[in-house]
Amino acid sequence: MDATSNWRDDVVGLIPALRAFAWSLSHNGSDADDLVQDTLIKAWTNRDKFEPGTNLRAWLFTILRNTYYTNVLRRRREVRDESGEYAGTLKAAPTQDWSVAMHALQTALQQLPDEHREALILVGAAGLSYEEAAEICGCALGTIKSRVNRARARLLKIMEADDATDVMAFETLGAMGRA
């Protein structure tokens, strides 16, 4: 019983990081919550498959990532709001400079290839090490480092960092990719 409660406590401690990663993939609070819930259900159901002493964070992030991409494949067959009319009614003009900068950052992130965006988010936003990100993505350490470097360079180019507004967005990124 003690091992189960320790495992549960460790998982609960990682929920904020899981939610942040889920939001970065889905860009929707409700979808992110659903994704985290699905991840926790799968993790709890398969907790006997987790090997103690291994990286619980990487295991949970891998479950979340795989769940997300499985859902994406399923949704490709669905057609919802194809013209974007409904989504257009939900837009509100940003009222603060930082929200404009964050919108520019989000738009720029969406222009990155999926692998580069994922690597940048795992290493920069989620705070994972390059090794953990490589394990989650199932690729070599050098590949992750290269993806983060290319993503940062392309993001700088997209956002034209000379703009004062864009500089504020980069301050939000912090030391992304410099780990």
Image (cartoon, helix red, strand yellow):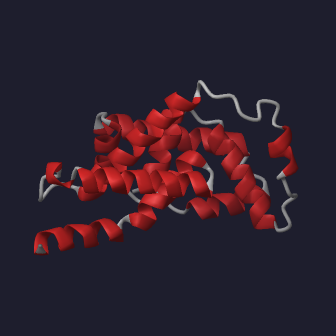
Is residue 53 visible from the viewing direction of this image? yes
State the image coordinates of residue 36 (x, y, percent, origin top left).
44, 56
From the viewer's perspective, is 131 left or right of 155? left
Q: Residue, x 80% and y 44% (percent of image)?
A: 87
Is residue 129 visible from the viewing direction of this image? no
Relative height, residue 35 to residue 67 (above, below) = below
Q: Residue, x 35% and y 38% (percent of image)?
A: 137
Assign the N terminus to one quadrant of the image.
bottom left
Number of marks drawn? 0
Question: Residue at the top extreme?
Answer: 77
Which corner quadrant of the image does residue 95 belong to?
bottom right
Nearer-the-camera pick, 50 or 147? 50
Nearer-the-camera pick, 52 or 41? 41
Q: Residue, x 17% and y 52% (percent of image)?
A: 50
Assign the C terminus to one quadrant of the image.
bottom left
From the viewer's perspective, is 44 left or right of 3? right
Q: Residue, x 64% and y 58% (percent of image)?
A: 170
Relative height, residue 60 to residue 14 (above, below) = above
Relative height, residue 45 to residue 112 (above, below) = below
State the image coordinates of residue 82 (x, y, percent, origin top left).
77, 30
State the image coordinates of residue 78 (x, y, percent, origin top left).
63, 28
State the image coordinates of residue 45 (x, y, percent, origin top left).
25, 52
